[in-house]
């Protein structure tokens, strides 16, 4: 089929707590659903996945891993394989090892962008349970190109970060519990397509990056002005694609980061650096104590004094670093959430 003939393309993204939501969603899909469904679940790249089998046991539609180059068919559910983005281009599946987005591959945002480019107003993006703000950038792009945003009721989600972040970017999204989503899909698929806006240059570029379309990417200038930040994945410079309430960065080779994910990644890197500094300072103090002991045996008082002072300074600095590790700076993001145990996510 030609995915631009008005056929509804439904992209579903989930992360933490998403398996349960996906199983409930699959159970409600009717056998005659006039749409193709695409599923991205964030997972470890090396983890074997049985998600198609799990969903297939509960779903009236056939469920399979996406195969690169396969023709998209109505009434089927396609699941992103581990360590691969799942996209649609010219009516066919693209299974790509394009650059990671927010540290993930597969990632929700590339799927949403590709459906926006492929189907425009016939695209539906669905955000289910998950942490941080994955999916919100792609969902916003989909709505801008005429598609429809659907979000799981945050209070129902095991991890409400992703639904709430999506609603922060797309306040007019359809919000429903998972059990009601199949009915929403049927209603939306039955609507006549009214046509959407032409694809923006940025959308074309970002989908090309996810597809690993080197020809298209090579023709493009840097995606935006320098952000003065470095990419956690490759240490290259990040360029600023931010607009209004959405902070969005991409490096020259294609890694993409949104506000929450970059913030969390930076926190992790700062913690790693602090532990490395703590290790170095404590080792320095230990060495100076040994030097002092050896010098004392030689009655070299000046060396003893200098070594003990150096050890004291190193331990004092180590104490300051340890204090930073015990009580790290709090999050400042506007989408800050906590778990049921009160832990900041």
Image: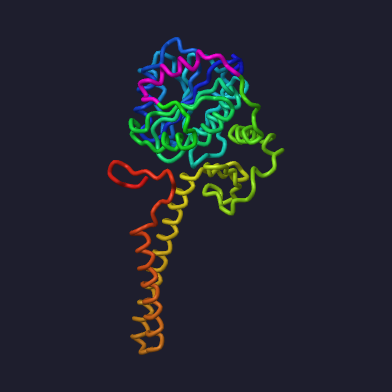
Q: How is the image coloured?
A: rainbow
Q: Of all residues shown, which one is farthest toward the top?
A: 32
Q: Is residue 247 above or below residue 111?
A: below
**At x 53% / y 42%, what residue is drawn?**
246
Look at the image and tell me in which quarter the N terminus lies: top right
Q: Nearer the viewer, residue 16 or 166?
A: 166
Q: Is residue 63 left or right of residue 204?
A: left
Residue 282 percent coordinates (x, y): 37, 68
Q: Nearer the viewer, residue 338 or 24?
A: 338
Residue 234 percent coordinates (x, y): 56, 48
The residue stretch that appears in magenta: 176-194
Q: Of all residues shown, which one is farthest toward the front?
A: 172
**At x 56% / y 45%, what residue is drawn?**
249
Look at the image and tell me in which quarter the C terminus lies: top left
Whether the magenta-drawn stretch holds residue 180 is answered as yes
Q: Nearer the viewer, residue 98 or 192?
A: 192
Q: Is residue 287 above or below residue 216?
A: below
Whether the magenta-drawn stretch holds residue 54 is answered as no
**At x 48% / y 34%, what residue is drawn?**
135
Q: Nearer the viewer, residue 57 or 8?
A: 8
**At x 38% / y 54%, what residue is drawn?**
330
Residue 119, image quadrant? top right
Residue 248 percent coordinates (x, y): 55, 43
Q: Is residue 319 left or right of residue 3?
A: left
Residue 331 percent coordinates (x, y): 41, 51
Please indicate, yes or no, whether residue 286 appears anywhere in the rendered image: no
Q: Of all residues shown, which one is farthest toward the right?
A: 219
């Amino acid at each position: 089929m030609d995915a631009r003939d008005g056929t509804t393309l439904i992209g579903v993204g989930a992360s933490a707590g998403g398996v349960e939501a996906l199983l409930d969603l699959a159970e409600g899909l009717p056998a005659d659903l006039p749409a193709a469904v695409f599923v991205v679940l964030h997972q470890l790249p090396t983890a074997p996945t049985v998600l198609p089998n799990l969903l297939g046991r509960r779903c009236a539609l056939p469920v399979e891993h996406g195969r690169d180059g396969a023709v998209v068919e109505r009434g089927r559910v396609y699941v992103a394989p581990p360590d691969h983005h799942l996209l649609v281009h010219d009516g066919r599946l693209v299974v790509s090892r394009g650059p990671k987005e927010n540290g993930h591959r597969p990632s929700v945002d590339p799927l949403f962008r590709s459906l926006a480019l492929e189907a425009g107003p016939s695209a539906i993006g669905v955000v289910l349970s998950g942490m941080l703000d994955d999916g919100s950038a792609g969902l916003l792009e989909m709505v801008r190109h005429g598609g429809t945003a659907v979000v799981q009721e945050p209070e129902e989600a095991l991890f409400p970060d992703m639904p709430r972040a999506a609603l922060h970017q797309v306040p007019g999204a359809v919000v429903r519990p998972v059990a009601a989503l199949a009915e929403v899909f049927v209603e939306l698929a039955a609507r006549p397509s009214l046509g959407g806006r032409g694809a923006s240059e940025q959308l074309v570029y970002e989908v090309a990056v996810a597809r690993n379309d080197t020809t298209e990417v090579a023709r493009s200038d840097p995606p935006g002005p320098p952000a003065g930040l470095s990419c956690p994945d490759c240490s290259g410079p990040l360029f600023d694609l931010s607009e209004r309430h959405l902070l969005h960065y991409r490096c020259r080779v294609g890694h993409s980061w949104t506000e929450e994910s970059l913030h969390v990644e930076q926190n992790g890197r700062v913690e790693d650096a602090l532990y490395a500094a703590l290790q170095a300072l404590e080792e320095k103090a230990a060495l100076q104590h040994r030097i002092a002991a050896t010098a004392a045996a030689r009655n070299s008082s000046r060396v003893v004094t200098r070594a003990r002072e150096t050890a004291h300074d190193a331990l004092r600095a180590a104490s300051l670093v340890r204090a930073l590790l015990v009580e790290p700076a709090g999050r400042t993001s506007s989408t800050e959430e906590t778990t049921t145990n009160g832990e900041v996510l």
